[in-house]
Amino acid sequence: MSSEPNTSPNPDAPRRPRGIYLLPNLFTTGGLFAGFYAIIAAASGDFTSAAIAVFVAGLLDGLDGRVARMTNTQSEFGVQYDSLADLVSFGMAPALVMYHWSLSHLKVYGPLWGKLGWTVAFLYAACAALRLARFNTQVGIVDKRYFIGLASPAAAASLMAFVWLFNELGFTGVDLEYITPVLTATAALLMVSRIRYNSFKTLPWGDRVPFVTVIIALGVFAALAVAPSRVLLAIAWVYAASGPATWLWQRFRPRTDDAPPSAPAA
């Protein structure tokens, strides 16, 4: 009885394994679950839990790639899966949290304002998708030291820290309904801008650092333990503003090459 013929172009080539790596994709799935939970929590009116869930998704998103590199389990499947999970966790989830918390209340001023609310939420989700698509097509092309446009996890953090803090302070989305459309649209447009942001990917993490650096890091961790929402809001918006501030500085700073050449020495 003859066996089934090998129809591959190169019969001697080793077969590629069809399975996927478990460990990094578990972290990606955890981030996807956190983003999905944020949407459910926001729809139920639990906005603090929704905001925290997006931060949990950001933590897991930062771990999956590092785990894959440490265990040498990178794969094209993992890259695509991570990107789709990011769209949910840092695109759809923040947009829907902002809509349920504040933007949906604009409809009480009339149909046009109601459309503005969901349009701004859609703008954020669409810009997050465009940002992720552009990032995927530019991997290996752009300078790894910088992101082109605000990264979607950072944009999500800037909005979710805002919701977390002001919800803790007793404010509702109705109280801030004139501010939230501007914040949401600003974060959306920064994602698709051409402004460069430091990626911190090339920092010498394994090198020796001054002792004061350890003290500063401990201070940041202590502040996060005492007032996490305030510290995260400050970090997120300082980082979001760092890109435009650097761009303005480089554009309008005095150029040293415009100075007249000095006279040659006698």
Image (tube, rainbow, N blue to C red):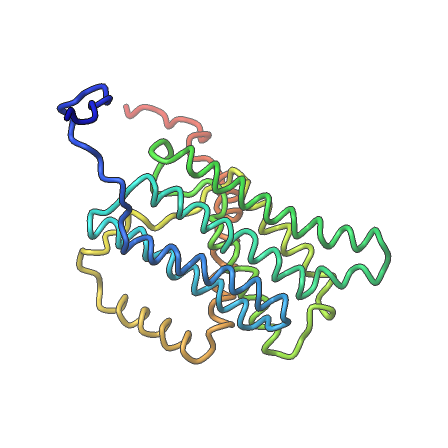
In this view, 35 is above or below 214: above
Q: Residue furthest front?
A: 1
- Quadrant where the N terminus lies? top left
| Residue 97 at x, y percent in the picture | 61, 62
87, 187: nearer the viewer: 87
Q: Nearer the viewer, residue 102 or 50?
A: 50
Residue at point 29%, 41% (across, down): 75
Report x, y in % for residue 198.
Answer: 40, 47
Which corner quadrant of the image does residue 177 belong to? bottom right
Residue 138, quarter of the rendered image: top left
At horizontal 47% and vertical 48% (from top left) the residue drawn is 151
56 vs 162, left or right, is: left
Counting the numbered discs, the total is 0
Q: Position of residue 120 (x, y in %)?
A: 68, 50
> Measured along the vertical axis of the image, is residue 67 above or below residue 140?
below
Task: Please state the horizontal and vertical placement of residue 51, each as a whole percent of the image.
Answer: 53, 67
- Please report the residue visible at 54 percent of the width from the left and 67 percent of the height from the top: 50
Q: Residue furthest top?
A: 9
Left or right, 39 with reference to 117: left
Check the picture and name the quadrant holding the C terminus: top left
Query: Which residue is rendered at x = 24% and y = 49% of the image?
Result: 69
Q: Nearer the viewer, residue 6 or 238?
A: 6
